[in-house]
Image (cartoon, grey):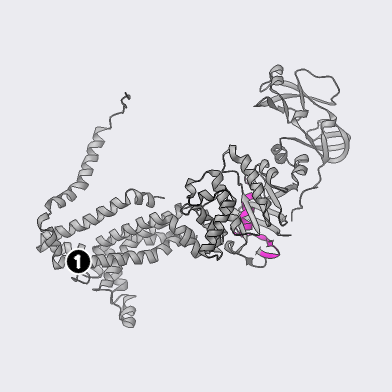
């Protein structure tokens, strides 16, 4: 027979407030699930508007994730491994889009990459590249808001990794690229996957910057969040069905990462 | 001559300046307290920390020479390091760890794998080839790391505290094994340690490093017989005294005079083995020429022996049997008489014999 474990009762007031907070966060999601008309879910998702939005969202978010990996990993490496003046400033600038209201991000993108933007105008005049009202613009907007998630996750992983493993690799004759590919990358692998998943989830949910910068054109820039917003006015079941799809994706990402991303972000 | 290193590294206010030469097939142990610059020396030799001044040459090829603007990166040096905690790549199997260096230096995948397996067999680890580092014991990990270092056939092998990460119980046998593996190694080897047992078991020559400078070097026997600093004397468990000799009388720095058997002149060091100091409750009368009154500062019991640290005119440690300790009734603060025979004081000149002039 085991002795009963004796514990001090938790403070009732704190528990009560905590319960309110938990309910506040959970109830809307439960409401969304409750309002879903399961019988018409499939037909709602097969609606041409929904199909277009889902297809576009998938393409744009995967592109945004790929671009974030291609450019964010080298930036994270530079921030973690190279000591240069102004490093903290660069880090602050790269993380800024995480806290910046997405709409402001969209305005900033418009001023830079719009048809009259200081980068957008030469790009259009010389190469005919136009971001506004194009899928490329939606990708750009999603990359802008999502890449910081990849950068901070990967940088934290690089910092918490023992840099002497890289020295050991160099000592064994490995050049920098070999060291990165065969030692650094595998050792930060879990964090890289977590960062990419977070980035993808953020890109998938991006609304403000996309609608401000790329516009809301079905089939070209109307991703799922934009379609949800529009459908809410005239076709609520479609809006709920699409919301449910996004919710499902988020839950899958969260469950597959479990506690990992929290651990990855705090070094 | 294989390695010829004129090392000068400045880190903040710490300055390390020394000259180190290591022949082919020679194992040199660099012994020193924490913070003496042992690891910095290895990192400089491996190219992980560039020199501030000086020059490192391996087989006549300049690896680092700030004056001439030469710095060969670590991956291009024929120099392998056994890191203190081995740093086996945790995501690779033992055989892949050993093959890593071979692959990086251009061997084909198949050749690297075959050679790596041969090295593991040589280390009696063939059955652990597919194990990840996390599944290996400390001793096994050390052998995998040694195989990984030796597999690239380096001209210079650096061992950074190879025994530090091992349990005390297996160190003896691992030292023996390491000596065996190094026996067949043709290049130069520098072993860094703070344990004189490592140096005694593995090295051909000893270099004592303190505060970034070489204070003494020579064979293990030379260094232990005639320590030149308190650190070396304590390491070897000896009492080191410093004074001026004239004939058979040695005046210590604090004014106490000792009588010695062999005459000397000028600045002199004297070594007394702790077991040669006898302790008495009352002032003894007898043949010992040196007798002084002291006070017990500390007592350390080691099996059937006790080391008694004495305060007084001469700070020294005496070693007596535990039985004698009880019979004398000694404890911290007890007054006691100490004596040592003149013939048991080993005196030698305090010149820089055996030390390298600092460049």
The reply to whether residue B272 is in sight is yes
Q: Is residue A65 left or right of residue B237?
A: left
Q: Is mark 1 on a helix, strand or loop?
A: helix
Residue B248, by quadrant, is top right
- On screen, residue B82 above or below A207: above
Residue B85 in view of the camera: no
In reply to whether residue B37 is colored magenta, the answer given is yes
Residue at point 32%, 25% (across, down): A2
Name the spot of residue A86 as percent of width and height, x first.
46, 62
Rendering quarter of residue B163: top right
Residue under label 1: A53
* Vertical placement of residue B354 versus B277, above or below: below
What is the quadrant of the N terminus of chain A in the image? top left
Placement of B283 over or under B97, stated as above or below: above
Residue B195 colored magenta? no
Q: Which of B142 and A135 is in front in this view?
A: B142
Q: Position of residue B289 (x, y in %)?
A: 85, 26
**Label 1: few (<14), some (14–19) or many (≥20) C-alpha neighbours in 10 Å:** many
State which region is magenta. Answer: B34-62
Q: Position of B238 compared to A28: left or right?
A: right
For the residue pair B321 and A212, the one nearer the viewer reads as B321
| Residue at left offset 84%, top offset 25% | B288
User: Residue A240: horizontal and vertical position, in percent?
Assistant: 14, 57
Please identify the residue farthest to the bottom as the structure is shown. A126
Q: Residue at x 81, y 30 (%)?
A: B256
At a point 48% along the width and 50% down the height, the residue shown is: B131
């Amino acid at each position: 027979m085991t002795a009963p474990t004796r514990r001090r009762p938790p403070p009732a007031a704190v528990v009560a407030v905590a319960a309110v907070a938990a309910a506040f966060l959970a109830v809307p999601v439960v409401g969304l699930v409750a309002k879903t008309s399961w019988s018409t879910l499939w037909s709602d998702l097969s609606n041409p508007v929904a199909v277009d939005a889902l297809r576009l969202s998938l393409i744009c978010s995967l592109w945004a994730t790929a671009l974030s990996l291609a450019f964010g990993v080298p930036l994270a490496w530079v921030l973690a491994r190279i000591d240069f003046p102004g490093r903290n400033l660069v880090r602050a600038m790269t993380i800024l889009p995480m806290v910046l209201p997405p709409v402001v991000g969209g305005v900033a993108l418009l001023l830079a990459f719009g048809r009259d933007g200081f980068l957008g105008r030469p790009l259009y005049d010389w190469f005919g590249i136009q971001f506004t009202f194009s899928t490329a613009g939606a990708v750009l907007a999603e990359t802008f808001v999502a890449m910081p998630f990849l950068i901070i996750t990967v940088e934290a992983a690089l910092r918490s990794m023992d840099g002497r493993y890289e020295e050991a690799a160099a000592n064994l004759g490995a050049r920098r690229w070999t060291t990165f590919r065969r030692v650094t990358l595998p050792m930060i692998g879990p964090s890289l996957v977590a960062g990419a998943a977070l980035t993808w989830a953020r890109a998938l949910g991006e609304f403000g910057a996309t609608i401000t910068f790329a516009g809301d054109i079905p089939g070209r820039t109307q991703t799922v969040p934009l379609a949800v917003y529009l459908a809410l006015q005239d076709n609520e079941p479609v809006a709920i069905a699409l919301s449910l799809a996004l919710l499902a994706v988020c839950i899958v990402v969260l469950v597959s990462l479990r506690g990992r991303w929290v651990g990855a972000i705090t070094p | 001559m294989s390695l010829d290193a004129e090392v000068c590294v400045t880190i903040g206010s710490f300055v390390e300046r020394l000259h180190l030469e290591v022949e082919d097939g020679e194992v040199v142990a660099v012994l020193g307290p924490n913070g003496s610059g042992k690891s910095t020396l290895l990192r400089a030799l491996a190219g992980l920390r560039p020199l501030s001044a000086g020059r490192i040459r391996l087989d006549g090829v300049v690896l680092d020479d700030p004056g001439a603007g030469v710095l060969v990166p670590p991956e291009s040096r024929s120099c392998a390091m056994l890191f203190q905690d081995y740093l086996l790549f945790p995501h690779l199997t033992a055989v892949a760890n050993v093959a890593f260096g071979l692959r990086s230096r251009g061997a084909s995948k198949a050749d690297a794998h075959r050679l790596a397996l041969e090295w593991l067999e040589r280390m009696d680890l063939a059955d652990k080839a597919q194990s990840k580092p996390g599944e290996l014991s400390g001793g096994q990990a050390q052998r995998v790391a040694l195989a990984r270092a030796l597999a690239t056939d380096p001209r210079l092998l650096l061992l950074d505290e190879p025994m530090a990460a091992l349990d005390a119980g297996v160190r003896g046998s691992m030292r023996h094994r390491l000596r065996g593996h190094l026996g067949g190694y043709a290049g130069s080897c520098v072993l860094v340690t703070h344990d004189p047992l490592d140096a005694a078991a593995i090295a051909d020559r000893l270099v004592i490093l303190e505060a970034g400078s070489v204070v003494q070097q020579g064979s293990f026997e030379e260094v232990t017989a005639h320590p030149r600093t308190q650190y070396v004397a304590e390491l070897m468990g000896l009492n080191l005294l410093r004074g001026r000799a004239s004939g058979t009388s040695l005046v210590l720095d604090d004014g106490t005079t000792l009588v010695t058997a062999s005459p000397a002149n000028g600045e002199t060091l004297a070594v007394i083995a702790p077991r040669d100091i006898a302790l008495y409750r009352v002032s003894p009368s007898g043949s010992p020429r040196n007798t002084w009154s002291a006070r017990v500062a500390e007592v350390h019991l080691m099996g059937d022996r006790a080391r008694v640290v004495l305060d007084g005119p001469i700070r020294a440690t005496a070693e007596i049997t535990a039985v004698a300790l009880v019979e004398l009734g000694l404890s911290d603060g007890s007054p006691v008489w100490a004596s040592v025979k003149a013939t048991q004081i080993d005196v030698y000149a305090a010149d820089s014999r055996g030390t390298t002039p600092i460049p």
